[in-house]
Image: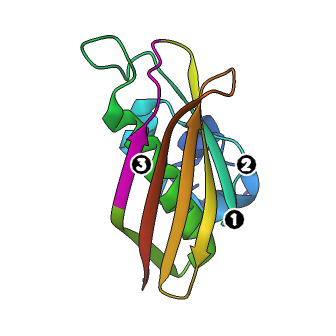
Amino acid sequence: MNANFTPPPFLAELAAAGVPDEYHAWLGDLGVGALVVKMGIVFGEMGAERMTATMPVEGNTQLAGLLHGGAHLVLAETLGSFAAAFHAGPHRRPVGIEIGATHHRGIASGLVTGTATALHLGRTLATHEVVMTDAGGRLLSTARITNMILDA
């Protein structure tokens, strides 16, 4: 190994968040973001058309002990923005311009799984639907996020 080589700063963060090694060169200087780490989000499948991740309920609840509605939106925005970034490629950046959600059912424990599916992948806009479910596959919330894709 070259004595002058400095590894990218976020490799451990990427590994802990479930980001496959094949994306570490691209994301190694960026990481996944402090909020993703704080929320305990771990990626599964990664791609522009479809992206999945899990998030624990524990640590992300509101006063009544249920998963905070804002936590649903954090998971949705994380998935939609990362999927838009995969569509945009390493030399362009997505910027969220719209997000909305409908909460269908509460959850007090366990893991939430989010699945982002592309609705539109254009040159300047990417829109994803993100469905959050519990371990039994029951629908918790549905969100839609649109990202504008900018040149870096």
Residue receiving disc 1: 49
Label ID, residue 33: 3
Point out which mark residue 147 bears: none
Please give the count of numbered marks on the rendered protein: 3
Amino acid type of the residue tagged 1 in the rendering: Glu
Q: Considering only order in the chain, which callout, 3 or 2, is on the residue closer to the N terminus? A: 3
Look at the numbered disc 3 and give the secondary structure of its residue. Answer: loop
The N terminus - image quarter: bottom right
**What's the residue at 42%, 48% (across, down)?**
33
Alpha carbon separation for disc pair 3 and 1: 21 Å
Identify the residue shown where x is 46% and y is 50%: 143
Q: Is residue 22 magenta?
A: no
Q: Position of residue 148 (x, y in %)?
A: 41, 77
Local SS, label 2: loop
Between the residue at mark 1 and the residue at mark 2, the CA separation in whole angstroms equals: 10 Å
Q: Considering depth in this image, is 24 or 42 the residue closer to the camera?
A: 42
Q: Is residue 139 above or below residue 101?
A: above
CB atoms at circles 1 and 2 under 8 Å apart?
no
108 relative to 61 in the view: left or right? right
In the rendered image, the quadrant that contains the C terminus is bottom left
Of marks 3 and 1, which one's residue comes earlier in the chain?
Answer: 3
Provide residue 111's location: percent of width, then percent of height. 58, 22
Picture residue at 37% right of the left edge, 17% below the top: 66
Relative to 91, residue 109 above or below: above
**Does the magenta-highlighted stretch encompass residue 102?**
yes
Q: Which mark is residue 45?
A: 2
Q: How far across and down, in percent of the image, does residue 87 sit?
A: 62, 74
Of the two numbered discs 3 and 1 in the rendering, the one whose residue sits closer to the viewer: 1
The residue stretch that appears in magenta: 99-108
- Crowd band around label 2 with a 10 angstrom C-alpha radius: few (<14), some (14–19), many (20+): few
